[in-house]
Image (cartoon, helix red, strand yellow):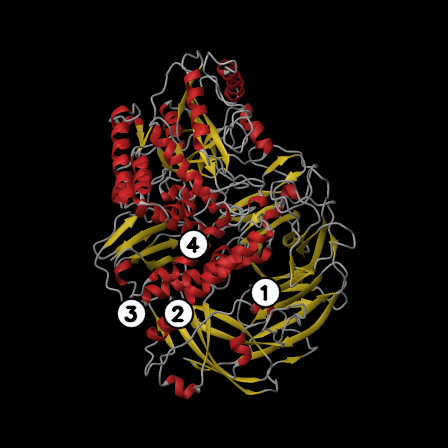
Amino acid sequence: MVLRMIKKVVFVLVVSSIAVDGKAIRNDDKDKVGCVVCHPLDENKINIHLIPHSHDDVGWLKTVDEYFYGLNTEAVGRTISVHNIISSVVQELLRNPDRRFIQVETSFFYKWWQEQDEYMRSSFKYLVDNGQIEIASAGWAMNDEACTNYQSTIDQFTLGLRKIEETVGKCGRPVVGWQIDPFGHSREHASILVQLGYSALFFARLDREDFKKRCSEHNLDFVWKSSDSLDDSNIFGSIFPDYSYNNPTNFCWDIACGDDQIVDNPDSVLYNINQKVEEFTTVLDKYASYYDKNIKNILVTMGGDFLYQSAGFNYENMDKLIRGFKNHTKYNLVYSTPSCYMKAVHDTNPSLQLKTDDFFPYSDYPHAFWGGYFTSRPNIKRFERAGHNILQATKQLYAFNKDRIDDRQIYDLKYAMGILQHHDAITGTERQTVTDDYVRILTAAIRKAEDPVGEIVSNLLNAKNNVKLDLSSCLLTNFSICSTSQNNDRFVVAVYNPLAWKTTHYLRLPVEGGQYLVNGPDGQEPYDVIESLSTFDFVDIKGEKPSSHELIFAAKDVPAMGLKLYHIEKISSTSTNSRETNKQLSGVFEIDENSNLLKRVTLNNITLDVNQNFYFYKSASDFDSSSGAYLFRPASSTPTPFSPAHLMRVFTGNLVEEIHQKWENENADIYQSIRYYKNENYLEFNWLVGNINIYNSNMGKEVISRFEISNFDNKNIFYTDSNGRQMMKRIKDERFDYKYNVTEEPIASNYYPVTSKIVMKDEEKNIQVTLLNDRSQGGSSLDKNQFELMVHRRLTMDDERGVGEILDESEFSLSIGMYARGSHYLMVGKTQGANENGKTTSAEERIFAHKTLLQPFVGLSPTDMTFEELEKQIDFQYSALQAELPENINILSFEQWVDNSYLLRLEHILEKEEDPKLSKEVTVNIKNLFKNIAISEITETTLGANVPLSEFSKTPRFEWNTLPKITSQSSTSNKLIGEDGSVTLNPMEIRTFIIS
């Protein structure tokens, strides 16, 4: 107690001293951006904005906790403790009010905050309020921009911003994005930042040829138009002149650095301040050459990975350097922040080039295209999507529970999903031990979040007589394992649909064959029992055994944000339902009798000759630029086909017809089913690829699934999605902003991230072909009639980009290469005009992509009751909505918020002009959305739910002069909320509300 009182007194004295002596504290608002206080600038010199920062990866070479606490020093060869970084910076900023720092990763900050006493918390908050610490980005992690889906990105920002609001308050609200380390930058991410209310985006990584051209044309500062559908979508972009985010060479003074300290004592024999000023001037002269001759501001990053553990070294030397430039004729050095730099540039009223596409792919050296991480570690990429699905469903179920429960049960899952968005997590560019830790964290979080779901569902279905469902999801169905369906002759399946429209979902549950009764709210349901794709004899999990068959049934028309309950009972051990047959399939797809490969497809009354096969690229193994966790570099431009393919079986049943293929070869184990669910409008390709053999050639192998279409010409143009939202036009061998050497890497230079779908169009034939996926993958169209997606990779070399480990995942034993299982969905329709269902192909794909991303949550529970007994005790159907929404409007988020409020996000899922009918504005009445939630108050906020629009509208906007000039877009959306609770959404618009 005495010690705490002393600390309080010391804090008061420190604060008083700063308030009196700090020349940076000014009352003039023109010297502020938000609460950040900007130092006065010299109009007659070039102002050098020194940006002290530490880039702290939320897991990479070490786990999240190892980085935070400083354990496992041998993994990186030095002590790294993020805890020490933040504490050290706070102490040094309190010593001198001129100093600045930016804090970025909220997951580390919040972990630090929870362990601090009142003195340290007050100190940090004081420094934020005093404008010395700028909170930049404030996501839970610095998210990747290639592999992430926009919904998970929004979630991780929402989590980070909420914790900033709860801890340091309004002065912690970010105004800029700081994406310095992700390996390329997406247009949709820039759009998300605009919608969060941010005015600028700072980054380092872009293609080296793009960087060279921008330097030569003085275009490092630019304006990014982040959407063609949204009004006011421009954001200021700034690229660092050093082509990195580190200190300039020879000017790193942290304990991890070896550069000379600055000595400004003239009596010392080691006096070197004049020399250091001269050296730094040389650096600045180089930077200045990249800008217009009238340049007045240059940003210089002073930091790097996990620096400032002993912040005094950095700040004391920067203090000396700033003083050394005090009388310099050309340069004026000041401590600064990203927002202060943005303001300084804006005040000079420059004309900036306009950017409209994105920054993919990224190449930093010859033959080094960072396209491997689009696919690396395919299993954790899929697990992240499953975690997202479960998180959205459980957040909604918690919110709908009649007795509001403590939502801390779900916090761990929010934290885990936020961490997985990190640019060395979902990317697969972390070490294996870190991957294992991510899986551990997410698995435990899912189980914790699911724990009360059975009770919640029982309540929503009005269970009587203490009937309670003990629900849990089956996370190993990819290995045909689910103990509940395998080990119980009677069990219950609860299917919860998190979408705002009804959906039909086909369940495939591992069973040991037999005959079943499947009963639901609509009575007895048809089903199929089909042999599993593989025996999965490589699986070695204690207490678990893969099942020989799958039970398939359709949960038809599951209500919008609603439930359907099914009772399953095994009545015989003999299977008679589905049969193997050699008869001709229905004609939706055909198999070539000689090759056993796909031959023809008919969808939307369009018939195409389509060949699909698996190939592999042999990986280049040059020491400098080999394929690795980050890079994709094939040894040749021609992949090797897996052959021959064998047709294992053909099934027809009540619901599905499918064929099972197997590729007999020495290079990998490959199985695939091609499925057509009757009355649906797509084909599903469910693949299993594993045990890639890298020893027979001592070369890595990168496996692709390629589709070739006869008599089809896309003119070398294809389209990939941006984080599951906007569609980006790609042209083979071309970039929109710069030229590059196509012959250098003709394959890898044409690979782009595909997080949702890849599209080809034959405009002359009016045919559009689309392949959708269930996780991030690299993909391309390398010829006028084909496209491909990379599904798995196993390598023999590290690509020397920092991870220091070969991407060679094994499973169950060191001799077995990791198996990955996933799905691709093929859709065909018209390029122009509506298909027979009245929707354009693009609209169909949008809706289907949402149904794929947010599949129903499926929970299983054993039961002793018969169907007749159970239906007397519980309802078999529930919906939280008064009525489903139109298919172009989705409820993106619904969850418990502060006190008795809820967070609600509505989104328009189509872009402008994608569909004549559905790409229109839509009005929704919020007050009439839900059945059992009476809404008395609606407050609209920015996308991150941290700033009410009424406050944000008072924030000064930064308008920019652009080349070419763009006319201001007229806003057609009614931003007001009607007295009846009605709101209007335009294409691609997301609106966020706190409702009470």
Label placed on residue 453: 2
Residue at the (44%, 52%) spot, across then down? 418
Can residue 968 be seen by looking at this rendering?
no
Q: Disc 1 versus disc 4: distance between alpha carbons?
A: 33 Å
- Asked whether the residues under the numbered discs 4 and 3 touch, taking CB atoms below 8 Å apart as contact, a structural biologist would say no
Kindly identify the amino acid type of the residue bearing the numbered disc 1.
Glu
Work out whether residue 894 or residue 26 is closer to the camera in this orientation and state it. Answer: 26
Secondary structure of residue under mark 4: helix
Kindly identify the amino acid type of the residue bearing the numbered disc 4.
Tyr
Could you tell whether 868 is left or right of 785 in the image? left
Pointer 1 or 2: first along the chain: 2
Pointer 2 or 4: first along the chain: 4
Can residue 790 be seen by looking at this rendering?
yes
- The residue that label 4 is drawn on is 415
Q: Nearer the viewer, mark 4 or mark 3?
A: 4
Q: Nearer the viewer, mark 1 or mark 4?
A: 4
Pointer 3 or 1: first along the chain: 3
Secondary structure of residue under mark 3: loop
- The residue that label 3 is drawn on is 402
- The residue that label 1 is drawn on is 684
Pointer 3 or 2: first along the chain: 3
Kindly identify the amino acid type of the residue bearing the numbered disc 3.
Lys
Where does the image place residue 972, in percent across and percent down from the top left?
A: 32, 45
Q: Residues within 10 Å of mark 4 (few under 14, many from 20)?
A: many
Quarter holding the C terminus? bottom left
